[in-house]
Structures are given as C-alpha cells and as structure tokens.
C-alpha cells in the first residue's frame, strides 16, 4: 500500500504483552523554551500488530490509521530490526560453566584448597576424646 498522505514514525517497541497490540516509544527533540538547548522527549503510541511478531526492543515503522480502539491509532508496517531479548537458557548456563574455571584463585592455591576435606563435623572430631579438664569440676 502507498502511505503518502499518512504520518509515519520509527520507534522502539516498549511492550508486547497484549495480543496484536504493541506500545511504541518515539523519541524526538524539542528546544528548551528558555535556554534553547535540545531536550529529548518520548511519546508512547499504541499500535496494531496484525501478525503479532513484534517483541520488546524491536525497531519498527508505524503508520497513522483510522481509530481501531480507544487508544489505538497506529499500525505496524514493518519490523526494521529485531533485538533478541537477553534471556538466560539452560544451554547458555551449561556452556558458561564449561568455559569458566570454577575458581579464580591461582592454580597452586586451588590445588591446596581442593585437598580432601571432611564432610561433616563428626568425622573431624571422631578421633578426639573429651578431656576431663573441661568437665566443669575442678580437682585440687
């Protein structure tokens, strides 16, 4: 379709939690009324996503359209770039564990620390018998 007379904007998808609806943030600059320095402004527009392919972080092109609902006045024309969300999967965790050493200590210290240690307090105190000196009664 030709959208010559309709407004088009490019923005970043902020939310995709609704079905076939996305919220797109459009950033633009406006000079400060007193100082004249450009100030960044953000406008959030609700857009209709027919294919429901947009995800949070995607850069999309939207076009003005007739009112589709109370707040929806824009439609997604194309997805310019996909931004894969930074999710942690079990494969990524397994790969990261294999690549990194378990400890950041020096190899000599790691070898000393990796010697066999008793598993419980009972094994440590198994050979030690209680002494009569600390029994609470003093003999004179």
Image (cartoon, rainbow, N blue to C red):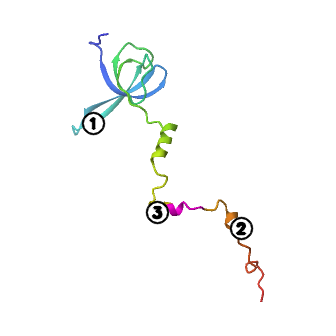
- Residue 24 image position (x, y, % from top left): 38, 26
Task: Identify whether 114 is placed above or below 86.
Answer: below
| Segment colored magenta | 111-116
The circle drawn on residue 108 is: 3
N-term mark: 1 or 3: 1
Task: Identify whether 97 is placed above or below 19.
Answer: below
Q: Quadrant of residue 133?
A: bottom right
For discs 3 and 2, the disc positioned in front in the rendered view? 3
The circle drawn on residue 126 is: 2
> What whole-number distance in Å separates the C-alpha atoms at marks 2 and 1?
73 Å
* Pick the front one: 54 or 127: 127
For discs 2 and 1, the disc positioned in front in the rendered view? 2
Residue shown at 74%/74% (left/top)?
A: 130
SS for dot 2: loop
As for residue 102 lying within the magenta part, the answer is: no
Q: Residue furthest bottom?
A: 140
- Residue 73 image position (x, y, % from top left): 39, 17
N-term mark: 3 or 2: 3
Residue shown at 29%/17% (left/top)?
A: 7
SS for dot 3: helix
N-term mark: 2 or 1: 1
Tag 1 residue: 39
- Position of 136 with respect to 85 (left or right) is right
> What whole-number distance in Å separates the C-alpha atoms at marks 1 and 3?
56 Å
As for residue 113 lying within the magenta part, the answer is: yes
For discs 1 and 3, the disc positioned in front in the rendered view? 3
Residue shown at 45%/49% (left/top)?
A: 100
Task: Identify whether 62 is placed above or below 129.
Answer: above
- Residue 113 image position (x, y, % from top left): 53, 62
């Amino acid at each position: 379709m030709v959208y010559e007379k309709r407004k088009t904007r490019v923005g970043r998808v902020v939310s995709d939690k609704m079905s076939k609806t996305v919220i797109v943030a459009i950033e633009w600059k406006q000079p400060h009324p007193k100082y004249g320095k450009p100030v960044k402004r953000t406008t959030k527009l609700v857009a209709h996503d027919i294919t429901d392919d947009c995800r949070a972080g995607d850069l999309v092109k939207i076009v003005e359209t007739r009112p589709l609902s109370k707040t929806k006045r824009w439609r997604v024309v194309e997805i310019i770039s996909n931004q894969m969300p930074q999710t942690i999967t079990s494969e990524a965790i397994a790969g990261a564990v294999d690549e990194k050493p378990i400890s950041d200590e020096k190899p000599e210290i790691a070898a000393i620390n990796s010697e066999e240690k008793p598993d419980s307090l009972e094994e440590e105190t198994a050979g030690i018998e209680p002494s009569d000196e600390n029994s609470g009664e003093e003999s004179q």
